[in-house]
Structure formats: structure tokens, C-alpha cells
Image (cartoon, helix red, strand yellow):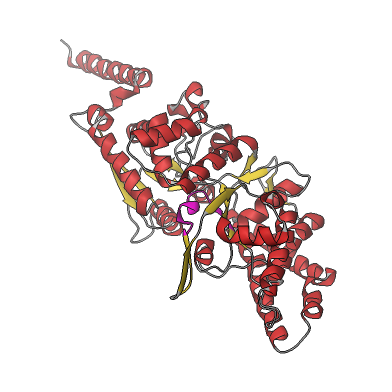
Amino acid sequence: MNKKILSVLTLSAILASTTLSGCSAKKNPDSLLSKDNPVTITIWNYYNGVQLIGFDEAVEEFNNTVGLEKGIIVEGYSKNSVSELADSVVAAVKKDSGADTPPDIFETYAETAYVVDQLDGLADMSKYFTKEELDEYFDEYIDEGEFSGDGSLKIFPTAKSTEVMMLNETDWQKFADSTGVTTDDLKTWEGLVDVSEKYYNYTDDLTPDIPNDGKAFFGRDSIANYMCIGAKQLSDSFVTINDDGEPELNLDKETVKKLWENYYVPYVKGYFTSQGRFRSEDMKIGTIIAMICSTTGAMYCPDEVTIDDDDTYSIDNLVLPVPNFEGKDPYIVQQGAGMSVIKSDEKHEYASAVFLKWFTEKERNIDFSVESGYLPVKEDACNYDEMIKIAEDDGKELSDVSKSTLKLAIDEIKDYNLYTMPPFKNSAEIRDYLGNHIQDTANEDYSEISEKIKNGEDRETVLEEYVSDDAFDKWYETFCNDMTGIIEK
């Protein structure tokens, strides 16, 4: 046969084979995988403690079952913290000197995913899931991953959390019996401030010979959540994304003042405080008797108070919903990192999708969530009775606080409006500023006020200087200028 004709026929056969192979992969993507030649998928996470143990156990189970059958080996690596993980991922995608090779999957919040996406580093995972499969997840969780606005899915939900209020019921009951307050008074921010003032006065009266030594009632872990969710509930998010995909500021003065009045003002008056790294530490030493923390943070709520070496006592804790502003629709934060997949080749991306799909199967996701304080991401998995049954069937012993936290958190995500701030350029800096500015100002001013009172100045006279309309106007002007500066960078 003519060599030229043979070459043409050979080339045609190769092209036909390639075309058929491509068609076959689309119809049966498992054909991309081979148990005889397994693909290795690396996952970077920030889990620690029981969360890391639970995740590593899940990875081991996958590798010994589905991974072994299909030809996928998953390797998980903890980067210890959210910030370390974010920095490592961005450096890897940028190929900075000394950076590691990018992982296939990394745990992420929207701010980091946005940065990596701007570097053209994220895979669109929507093509690996059917509409019916995605419909099983909470709409809000999927919406968060579709931040680019083009229908692509850049963050896949794996485990979520929200916030709850934890109350030292033992010390609360003494206070409640004396003053007539009830837990219903804690349903609104306005009510919480009123109760906190009563608690300050109640504890101050316990030592009539020592003036102005009342104790703070309340503390909060995430001030950024308070600011972001409060603004959304009162008017609108501080930052919205316009039709051109650009961030726009909404710094409504009435909204900002309401937030200031219900955090800064009670803080400088001594009704709220923040001393340890987390409010559970403040609860532990009796500095406060109520706090708002994440559902995962609730697992660390102390069951005893240690005033000093000679004064330690056991306490019971009560789990309550996060307050809302009076007369407003209820809102609660939607938080908890998802997982993003680095853009690579179809084989690695599909293998990543296989693991993510497996990890969020109902019973498995419940098992991981219950153990780590997170919430499942599928709607039918968020069933309290079923979650407890699965945990008990697996031999897990849940504390009363863990059970109460799960039950309340499930009710919140079903009854409240879920909200998380959309990602944009400098969104991480905006969030940090929202959490730090009002807190730093409150800390500094509280110290000044305390020093003035200690030096003999009248408490009410001193406070008036700091909580006046003029004081707010000055703070608000700085707030607006700083927020605008960050957005316009």
C-alpha cells in the first residue's frame, strides 16, 4: 500500500479514536479514571483537633472504598489556620518563589476564592454535577459558590456553621430571680443591652462599699458578623455588587448609628467586654455570663467557672438564638468554609468532584458535622432527630450542650434569612475593618473612661462625652472615610 495513503489512514484512525475517547469520557467520566493507574488528589485544609481527626478518618475511608475502586488517592494536609492556608494557596497559584505546588482542592472562604479566581486559578465544578444533584444542597450555599455571576460554581459547600448565644444558666438564674429578667428579654439587641445594664447594676450593688465595680454581662466572638448581619437586617449590606460587578458602599448613617448604640455604647459603659482571645475564655473566668459564638465555638463553652485557685464552681449552660433588631426580619450569618478546586485537567478535576460528592453524601456529612460542630450542607440532612440517631448508631456520645446547639442551629438556618457578604476586591480587608474599627475604638475609649473614673471624675459625666451625638458623628466620619478608602484601592 502507498505509504502516503497508509499515513493518512493511520492519522484518521488516531483522530477517530481520540474523538471517540473524548465522547466516551463525557458520557462516562469514570473512564478518565483507572484503578491500575490511580490519580492522586491533594487537599489543603485548616482543620485542627476533632475536626482534623474527623476529616482524616473520612479521607482514609474514601481511599479504602470508592478511591480504591475508581483509582483515586486523596492526601489531606492541614495548614493549621485560615490565614496560613489562604496565604499558601495564593502564593502557590502565583508560583511565588519557595511556594508549594498548588493543591487540587483547598478549603476556602469566599474572599480567598475570589482572589484565586481573579488569577484564573479555579475550576468550574458545575459541569461535574447535575442540576438535580445541586438542588439537594441549600440554595444559599450554592449561591455563595456562584459569586462570579456567570453560572459557574467556584466554591463547593462541604460543612457550614452559624452562630448561637451561650448563657451561663447557673449565674443567670441568681440574677433573674433578683431582677425579674427572662430569656425572652434576650431575643433582641435592644433587650440584650437593657439586660446587660441591669446585670452591671446588679453586680455593682453586690459590693455597695465599692462604687462602679459592676460586671459585664455579654461578649461576642465575631464583631464583623454583628456589623455585616446587622447592616443587612436594618437596611442593606455595607457593600453590594452592581451590574458591572463592581462593589458599591451603603453607609446609611441611621443604620451605622444603631449598630454603634448597641455595641460601642454598652461596651464603654462596661456592660459588654472582650478580654481573652475568645469569649469562651471570658466565660471560663466569670468575666461574662453570656456570649455569641459559632456553632463550632459552642463546643468549647466551659462547664465550670474559675475565679481563682480557691474559687471554682460548675455551671449549666443554656443555648439561645442570636438576637435580632426589634421589629426587623430575622437574619443569621452563613459561615463555614467550602472547598474550591484548582483549575488543571479533566482527570484531576473530575476526581476532585468524585471526592466532594462522596464527602457530602447525607450520612457521611452528618457524621462529620455532628462530630465537629458543623452543619450538613444538604437540606434533607439537616434533620435533628436523624442527626442524633446517626451519631448514636456510630457510638458517639454528645453532650447536652452539643445536642442543644445542633437543634437550635438547625432551627435558625431554616427560620432565619441566611446572609454572607459577597466577595470582591479587598473584601477581606473590608471585613477585617468592620470587625476591628468599632472594637478598637471601644477598647481604647473604655480604658480612658475607666482611668478618668478611677481618678475621681463622675461616671455619668465622663460617659456623656463618649456616647454623645457629637462623639458618634466624629467616629462615623472616620468610618466612612476609611471604608471608602479601602473600596477605592
Q: Is residue 39 above or below residue 106?
A: above
Asked if residue 471 can be seen in this view, the reply is yes
Is residue 443 left or right of 129 when viewed as pictured? right
Q: Is residue 399 above or below residue 279?
A: above
Residue drawn at (43%, 41%) of the image: 369
Residue drawn at (57%, 44%) of the image: 334
Residue 4 falls within the magenta-colored stretch: no
The quadrant holding residue 222 is: bottom right
Q: Where residue 350 sits: x, y (%)?
A: 36, 31
Residue drawn at (74%, 68%) of the image: 478
Asked if residue 361 can be seen in this view, the reply is no
Q: Where residue 376 sits: x, y (%)?
A: 47, 36
The quadrant holding residue 488 is: bottom right
Residue range in magenta is 291-303
Viewer-nearest residue: 241 or 165: 165
Outermost residue to the bottom: 455
Outermost residue to the top: 1
Viewer-nearest residue: 439 or 185: 185
Residue drawn at (69%, 76%) of the image: 445
Is residue 340 left or right of 351 when viewed as pictured? right
